[in-house]
Image (cartoon, helix red, strand yellow):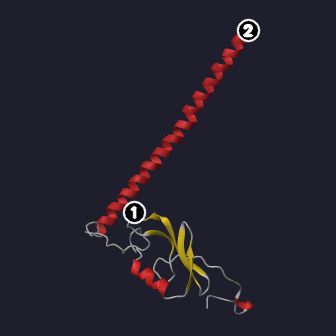
Amino acid sequence: MENNRNFFITIALSVLILALWQYFYVMPRSEMQREAARIEEQRVAEQKKAAQGTSPGASETPVQPGAIPNAPGGDAVTPAGREQAIASTSRAKIDTPSLEGSINLTGARLDDLRLKHYRETVDKTSPEIALLNPASLSNGYFAEIGFSGTPDVGRLPGPD
């Protein structure tokens, strides 16, 4: 009986300590965080109002496609531009069951790679997804392997 009484006293004291910790330490901290978040929201709202007030009509002007660089849908590669860039250089063709493309023989730059079984949209006639694009395009993305060194090394082999 004595052991049970001590056990229940220990449990009661543990619960009391946890409740006091929550009340005196955790609650004031969470209140300070809520207050800081509220102040930050007010500051951001005031900045937005000030920005709208200094340039009236700014929110009424629509953004033109391509006005924001690197925005999705902004500088889409036109197939004619891509095909023209690919045709202007000598290339080695790549054709596998899932990939197709070519390697630019000048500099051995892999800059034309497309997925055969995946399209940009669900439409069967939409263009294949292009993983790599020639560097001459505005959104050129390519893989290149070569030599690099410090300027005092001298002339190293390059794409030419």
Picture coordinates of residue 137, whole percent (x, y): 46, 81
Is 82 positioned to the left or the right of 57 in the image?
right
Distance from Cα at disc 2 to Cα at disc 1: 76 Å
Mark whose residue sits in front, 2 or 1: 1
Q: Nearer the viewer, residue 141 or 56?
A: 141
Picture coordinates of residue 27, whole percent (x, y): 52, 36
The residue wearing badge 2 is 2
Is 81 positioned to the left or the right of 148 in the image?
left
Residue 79 occupies quadrant: bottom left
Badge 2: few (under 14), some or many (20 or more) residues near its Cα, within 10 Å?
A: few
Q: Is residue 11 above or below residue 158?
A: above
Picture coordinates of residue 139, whole percent (x, y): 47, 76
Badge 1: few (under 14), some or many (20 or more) residues near its Cα, within 10 Å?
A: few
The residue wearing badge 1 is 121
Residue for point 41% across, 70% down? 127
Considering every residue shown, the one lying at the far top of the view is 1
Precedes in sequence: disc 2 or disc 1: 2
Q: Is residue 137 above or below residue 129?
A: below
Tell me, yes or no, whether the two marked residues, 2 and 1, touch with CB atoms within 8 Å.
no
